[in-house]
Amino acid sequence: MPLMPVALALLAGIVVAILTPRVDTGVWVAAMVASTLVGGILLIANVKRKDSILTGLFLAVMFVVGGVRQHISDPVRDELDWRRQCNAPNYLELKLKETPVPREKTYRVLAQVVAVDEQEVRGSLRLYLRKDEAASALRYGDRLLVHGYADTARGMLYTTGDHYIIIARDSTSRKARIEGLRMRLLRRMQAGPLPTRQAGVAEALTLGWRADIDPETRASYRDAGIAHLLAVSGLHVGLLAAMVGLLMFWTGKERRGRTIRGSVQLVAVWGFALITGLAPSTVRAALMFSLFIVSNILGRRTETFNLLAASAIITLFANPMLVEDTGWQLSYAAVTGILLARPAIINRRSRLIKSADVSISATIATAPITIVTFHQFHPYFLISNILIIPFSAVILALALLYMAVPAAWTAWPLEWTLRAVEALTSWVASLPGAVIEIQ
């Protein structure tokens, strides 16, 4: 597992940099230079231990690279961060980085801050818009000029239609076209014959759109300990890759067949990741499965921990602030727990026991994060996972079919499968002590 120490060194550097905000970036750069010099001196002085010294030197450099990368990305240290310019009612030029998500009384959307009072800045904020006709027409890529008070502490801004205007629209960029396709597919699904309650779950699984999930359904899944099924994650990406692989069985096991099958799987995996919004857990899964698929095409044996480490290195180097993202933390913790327990799981004879072991491993690994973040624990997670996980592949396949063809004959099997899952989750969630509050 040569990549795991590298990923851990990079992660450690990022975490230390977050915990030491007063340390200047120059100190980290000096540490990189010093570690390189010390390693070089040791290398010259002790040639016999060349490999060990090179390994230690490389890990030290990766640790410092993590610290430097975090310093560069941290908005708190950015002289051009928009928060430094907001201290009164300001004119903010914003670019919407996603499609506005409807809430009970507002629309919520992540926006890039382009300028404050015509002065160029960097960073992003959460924009809350009052529900009205003007807000409902907004979409990804729109540029707004907003006048108001921005909450710099919480990184948010609430405004109404009277206090902003659209100054430009983006309909030509690749991301805008992908988001446009996503919204067209969403509208097709919403107009289809699937009942609203089940349609919300189908939209979440196929398009990553969770705004239409019924609150009761959301609470039921959460209290049953399977809220992760409502968010596109490694489970769904893996199921999609496996389904495509099964459909491409006719390509055979030779190099040419593996190349054709792998290429189709890569297109499916990344197309799914793009259309569902590129959430951290989805990107992690897409990277892991992409590396696995490529290694399979090349006919090389792959260590799963290396795939996990490689995806962590790529995502953290691209955006070190993901370390603070709960979704990213839960995703990597769950997979790490499963991989650590994998040797024992493989030796199990019963598929039911294997499924239970996977669920237990992932839950134990993620429990500290969920308890600290959400202050809850769901003791019946094992029952709900054993009962419901087997439905996952069927639900995803039916939901994808319904997304492609929103007709009665595709809606009926999906509706009743989801009704069965809802009945099971409601039963588990209603058991005594289904939710343990931890303060």
Image: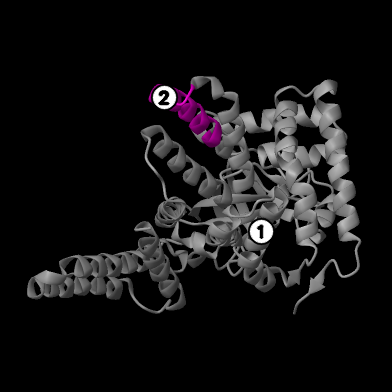
Q: How crowded is mark 1: few (under 14 residues within 10 Å), some or many (20 or more)?
A: many
Give the residue displayed 81% in from the left and 33% down from the top.
Answer: 414
Report the residue at 54% width, 65% height from top.
324
Place of residue 358 in the rendered image (x, y in percent of width and height, measured from the top left): 64, 56
Numbered label attached to residue 254: 2
Picture quadrant where residue 119 is located: bottom left
- Image: 135 above or below 244: below
Residue 253: x %, y % from top left: 46, 26
Q: In this image, 311 relative to 281: left or right?
A: left
Tag 2: amino acid: Glu
Lower position in the chain sequence, tag 1 or tag 2: 2
Magenta-highlighted residues: 252-270
At a point 59% along the width and 28% down the height, the residue shown is: 246
The image quadrant of residue 21 is bottom left
Residue 230 in view here: yes
- The answer to whether residue 258 is magenta is yes
Residue 341 x/y as whole percent: 57, 61
Q: Name the residue under label 1.
A: 357
Residue 306 magenta-drawn?
Answer: no
Instruction: Provide the major secondary structure of the magenta segment.
Output: helix
Quadrant of image for the N terminus: bottom left
Q: In which quarter of the image is residue 297?
A: top left
Q: Where is residue 142 in the image (x, y as percent from the top left)?
A: 58, 39
